[in-house]
Image: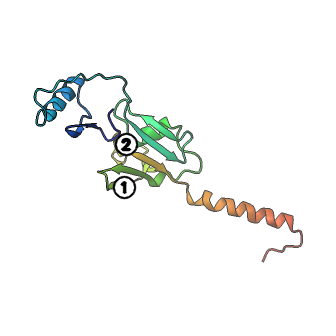
Amino acid sequence: MVQPDGYINVTVAGTIPVSGLTVDQAHDLIVDKESTKLKDPELTLVLESFTHPYVVVAGQVAKPGEIELKENTSALGAILLAGGFTPNAKSNQVILFRKMNDEFAEVKILHLSRIHKTTQLEKDIALQPGDMILVPQDTISNIEHYLRVANVGMYMNPTATIP
């Protein structure tokens, strides 16, 4: 089984990267690695199923979850595939998390609210499998909840006066 990071674990040869290889290329690579410890190894490699690479879109979008990458997809494109921004979204500070290795991830802030023309598309970014996009809640909607509660409190206490 190919792990999410694109590697497989072979008992003798250990961990082998096969992401992006055809079945024949993966076969030859595995046999080559096994040949260092085994004499004339034989291998039958079968592709039983295939999972498309995906990104995760979370936060203030209509349908958060996994978005399958079938072709070149940008951050804004993935957000649109996730149903678009909710009214509470902070579209000028979308956060992209990109895993660099087992220990580190790159974090980028994308200013997607400023894209009004095709000439501004350089503010968007092409996604890679495993990327995660987080659309945070804007500041106004964060405090709006407290303002509504405060206003309800004034109506519930008829003796309250406005300072």
Q: Nearer the viewer, residue 8 or 96?
A: 8
Q: Residue furthest bottom?
A: 163
Vertical relation: 126 (above or below) 151: above
Task: Measure the alpha-carbon separation of dots 1 and 2.
Answer: 13 Å
For residue 107, the mark is 1
Quadrant holding the C terminus: bottom right
Q: Amino acid at mark 1?
A: Val
Quadrant holding the N terminus: top left
**Residue picked out by circle 2:** 130
Query: Could you tell me which secondary element the residue under label 2 belongs to?
Result: loop
Q: Please, which colouring scheme is shown?
A: rainbow
Report which quarter residue 61 is drawn in: top right
Q: Nearer the viewer, residue 3 or 113?
A: 3
Q: Can you give x and y, in whole percent of width and height, for residue 3 in the image?
A: 34, 38
Q: Which is more N-terminal, label 2 or label 1?
A: 1
Report which quarter residue 129 is drawn in: top left
Q: Could you tell me if the residues under marks 1 and 2 are in contact, i.e. CB atoms within 8 Å? A: no
For marks 1 and 2, give the one nearer the viewer. Answer: 2
- Which residue appears at 25% of the width and 23% of the height? 45
Q: Can you give x and y, in whole percent of width and height, for residue 46 in the image?
A: 29, 22
Q: Can you give x and y, in whole percent of width and height, for residue 97 in the image?
A: 39, 51
Q: Can you give x and y, in whole percent of width and height, for residue 79 in the image?
A: 47, 41
- Which residue appears at 20% of the width and 23% of the height? 24
Q: How many marks?
A: 2
Q: Amino acid at mark 2?
A: Gly
- Which residue appears at 74% of the width and 62% of the height? 149
Vertical relation: 85 (above or below) 46: below
Left or right, 105 with reference to 42 = right
Left or right, 11 with reference to 67 = left
Left or right, 135 with reference to 46 = right
Graded by Cα atoms within 10 Å as few (under 14), some (14 to 19) or many (20 or more), the crowding at tag 2 reads some
